[in-house]
Amino acid sequence: MEKVSTKTITVNRQARHEYFIVESYEAGIELFGTEVKSLRAGSCNLKDSWCDIKDGELFIKQMHIAPYTHGNIFNRDSYRDRRLLMHKREIMKLMGQVAQQGYTLIPLSLYFKGSRVKVQLGLCKGKQLHDKRADMAKRDAKRDIERALRDRQRG
């Protein structure tokens, strides 16, 4: 069996700070040629993007893909809604969780899997301010422990 290579295009680091990630899913994305060429150049931003389910289809909104420099008339709107490709039963499951349990669908990362562009979606729940502070305190404590261990090994 052949291993498919993956190359990360961009990661939504703000999502991990703002949300608890309950579950993650992989979805394909419907793009035009100039958008893929722009992604190969690394021109993408997921910062304020989110996903919506409309008429049984999954769309990513507010994802910015910069216009391709040599694309001229073939360039599309950089903030247009793009359809995500998942199985119908997965979309229906997500629709139920988003509607009833108050979850949000947030794109976590964008990457090439072979020659295809894939999106990692997170089923997320919003963090309160005290949750964010607790995460920052944990991260600082872990950093301090690692620093102390490293210093102890040196001397």
Image (cartoon, rainbow, N blue to C red):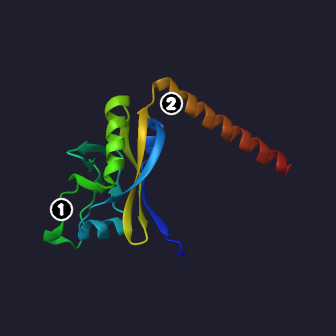
Residue 28: give x, y in percent of width and height: 35, 60
93 relative position to 23: left or right: left
Kind of residue sitting beneath label 2: Lys
Q: Which residue is mark 1?
A: 76
Q: Residues within 10 Å of mark 2 (few under 14, many from 20)?
A: some
From this viewpoint, is residue 36 visible? Answer: yes
Residue that appears at 44% across and 36% down: 19
Residue 53: give x, y in percent of width and height: 26, 44
Label 1: state its secondary structure: loop
Residue at the front extreme of this rendering: 89
78 relative position to 121: left or right: left
Q: Earlier in the sequence, mark 1 or mark 2?
A: 1
Residue at the right extreme of this rendering: 155
Label 2: state its secondary structure: helix
Q: Is residue 99 above or below residue 63?
A: above
Report which quarter residue 31 is drawn in: bottom left
Between residue 119 and residue 14, name the one nearer to us.
Answer: 119
Q: Is residue 45 above or below residue 19?
A: below
From this viewpoint, is residue 41 visible? Answer: no
Q: Which residue is mark 2?
A: 132
Report which quarter residue 96 is drawn in: top left
Kind of residue sitting beneath label 1: Arg
33 relative position to 74: left or right: right
Residue that appears at 42% across and 33% down: 125
Q: CA distance from mark 1 to mark 2?
A: 37 Å
